[in-house]
Image: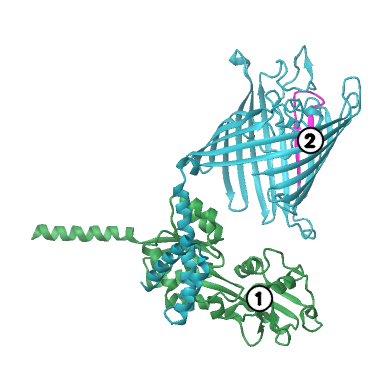
Chain colours: A green, B cyan
Amino acid sequence: MKTLSILVIFLIQTISLTLPCFAQKVVVEGSTTVLPIAQRAAEVYMQSEPQADISVRGGGSGVGIASLIDGTCDIADSSRPIKDTELDKAVANGKSIKAHVIAMDGIAIIVHPSNNVNALSKRQVKDIYTGKISNWSQIGGGDQKAVVVSRDTSSGTFEAFMTLVLDGQKVRPDAIMQASNQAIASTVARTPGAIGYVGLGFLSSQVKALDIDGVSPSKETVLTGKYAIGRPLFMYTNGAPQGLAKGLIDFIKSEQGQKLVDEEGFVALK
Amino acid sequence: MKKSFIVLLLMGCVVSFLGVGFSYGAEVDILLQKLVEKGILTAGEAQEVKTETQEQMKNEIAEGKNTSLPLWIQNMKFKGDLRVRYQSERKKKSSSVQGDREKGRIRMRLGAEAKVNTKTKAYVGIATGNSTDNRSTNQTFDDSFEKKDIWLDYAYIDYLASPWATLMAGRMKNPIWQTGDMLWDTDINPEGAAVTLTKNLKPNKLDSFLTAGFFVLEDSDDATSDATMIAVQPGLTWSINDKTKFKLAETMYEFNSVQGASALSDTQNTNTMAGGEYKYDYDSWVTSSEISFLEPKLISRYIPYLAFFGDYVNNPDPNNENTGWIMGLKFGKEKVADWGDWQFKYQRRKIARDAWLDSFPDSDVLSGATNVKSDEYILSCGLNKNMTVDFDYYHSDVIKGSKTPQRLYQVDLNFKF
C-alpha cells in the first residue's frame, strides 16, 4: 500500500512537472489584410484556452508563406492564393501545403448620395482612380469634378484595391488619403463629387454604393463570386493542422469566429 | 464531415473531368451552385469548398510534377543568355593605332546551379570567348564561318556555413561589390576562395556585410613567387525609408609578388615598369557608394527609379598618377525585363596610370588600359519578356601622352532564357 501511495505521488508529481511542456505554442504570420482577423481570433481563443500561446505577426502574404515553407511559422496568413513557384518550393522542402479559406474580402465603391451615377465598370473605377477620368460628366454624371478618396498605402484594403481594381497602377497624386474605412465613408458622405472604397461592413445610408459591372455589392454577391471586387482570404498550414493550430482555424471557421470576421469588416462565410 | 465528403467528391469529379478533357472549373461551379440552390450548402460554404478544392488540386499537381521528375533534375536549375552585337570603333589613326572598325559579335553563356545538399550548391558556367582574354566572352564574326570556341567561364562551390556566413571556392563570380567597371571588367571571374558574412544591425533598416577573398593571379614554379591578391570589403546597406537605400563599402586590396615581377597576363602595358617589372605595388583602397530612390518625389510618374553611384581608388605607393574614379547616374526602370521598360545610364571615369593594375578594367575603354578617361552613355529598352536592346556609346581618350580618342558604338540585342 505504501509502495502504491509513493508510486501515485510520484506519478502526480511527474505529470504536474511535465504539464507546462504541453502548453502549446503556435506562430501565425503573413498578410496584413488577414492580420486583424487573426489577432482578434487569437485574443478571444486564448481567453477560452488559457494554456494556448498564439503569436500573431504581419509581414505580408509572401513572408508568411516563406516562413511556413521554412518551418518558422505554423500558420501562414495570405490575402492571395499561393503561387505555383511557392508550391514547388514547398514540395522541394518536403511540405504539403493545405489551404483554409477563413473569410472573403469585399470592397464597395461609394459616392455621395446626390451623385446620379449608379453603376460603373471596374475599368471606369480604375480610370477615375488613376486620373484618366476626372469629371463625372465623362461617364454620364453631372458636370462635377471627381474627388478621389483612398486608403493610406499601408492598409490591407488599399492593397486589395490596388490588386483587384488598379492592376498595380498608382492612385492619382491629388487623391485624399484616409487612415480608415470609416474616415473614407465620412469624407464621401460630406463631399459631393467624391468617390471612395470601403469594406462591405462600412456601408450606410450616408453614402451610395455603386453597382460594379452590373452587380450590387453584397455579402451574397461577394460569396458567390459575382461581385468583381472580392477575394478569398486564406490561412495555410503544412498538411492538415494539428493541436492548437487546428483549434484556432476551427474556431475562426465557427459561428463565433465568423462573427469576429464580420465585426472586423470582412465578409463572413456563414 | 459533410464538407470533407463534398471536397472528396469534387476532387473525384475534377480528376474525371481532367481525364476526359473537360473544362472542370465551370463544371464544379455548376455542381456547387446546385448544392446551394438545394440548401445543402450555404454560399459561403460553397465558396470555401470551391477555393479549397482549387488550392488542393494545385498542391497535388505540384507534388505530382515534383515526384515525377528525377531527383537530379529537381536539384538543378539552368539559365542562359545570348547577345548579338553590332560594334563600330572610330579611332584617330596614328602610326601605332588602327583606324575605324566595324564588327559583328556574339556572346552565349549557359549556367547551371546544382543543389549538392541543403547547405551546399555548385555553380558551373560555360561561355563563348577565348582562353587568352580574361575580360571578354565575345566572339567576332570572322574566319569564314569557322566554329567558335566555348570555355569554362566559372565553376565554384557555395557553402552556407550559417545563415550569416557563406564560403565560396573555385573560379567564381566576383564577390566584391563595385558600382562601376572601372576596376573590374564584369566578365572577370576571380579564382580562389572567399567568405561573405552578413549581419542585420537594425531590422529592415541597417545591414552590414564583410566579404574577404584570397585569389591567385599567376602560378609560378616557386610558391613564394605566386602572384596573389587579398581583398577585404566591409560595407553597410542602409534603408533610409521604404524607397531610399544607401550602400557604402570600403575595399582594401593587397597584392603579393606583383611589385618587381613581370607583367601579368592580359596587361595593356600602361602601368609603370622598370626593367620589364612592375615598379610599384598596387595595394589599394577603394571606396564605393550608391544611393537609390524608388518612385522619387515629383518625377515618379515618369521615372520610377533613380540612382547615383561612384567608386574612388587610391594606390598609396606611387607619388603621382595614383588615383582613379568613376561616377554616374541611372534612371528609368530598376530592371529592364519586359516591353516598355527602359533605363538610361551615364558614367564618367578617369583612372591614372598607376592607380590600379591594367589587367582588370573594363575592356571597352581603350582595351581596358589605365591612364584613360571616358564618358559612357547606355540606353536599355525592353522589347518583350526577357528581350532587350541596348545602345551603348563610349568616348574615351588617354589622360597623358599622345591623344588617341576613341568613339565606340555598340548595339546589343539581348535574350535571356
Q: Residue at x 52, y 58 (%)?
A: A64
| Above-or-below relation of B115 to B94 | below
Q: Is residue A96 magenta?
A: no
Above-or-below relation of A11 to B256: below
Can residue A259 be spotted in the picture? no
Tell which of B7 and A194 is nearer to you.
B7
At x 73% / y 25%, what residue is drawn?
A: B359
Instruction: Describe the element under mark 1 as helix, strand or loop.
Output: strand
Query: A147 or B187: which is nearer to us?
Result: B187
The answer to whether A230 is drawn above or below residue B416 in the figure is below
Instruction: Tell me the residue that label 1 is attached to.
Output: A197
Q: Mark 2 — on which chain does it sit?
A: B
Query: According to the image, label 2 marks what residue?
Result: B325
Residue closest to the eye, A191 or B238: A191
Badge 2 local density, few (<14 within 10 Å), some, or many (20+)? Answer: many
The CA distance from mark 1 to mark 2 is: 52 Å
Q: Is residue B8 left or right of residue B194?
A: left
Q: For the residue marked with disc 1, what is the amino acid? A: Tyr
Q: Position of residue A135 (x, y in %)?
A: 80, 77
Q: Seen from this angle, which residue lies furthest front?
A: B20
* Image-based side of B34 in relation to A5, left or right: right
**Quarter-wise, where is residue B351 in the image?**
top right
Residue B241 left/right relative to A223: right
Q: State the count of labels.
A: 2
Q: Residues within 10 Å of mark 1 (few under 14, many from 20)?
A: many
* Start-end of magenta stretch: B308-325
Question: Does residue B273 appear in this view?
Answer: yes
Chain at tag 1:
A
Q: Amino acid at mark 2?
A: Trp
**SS for tag 2?**
strand
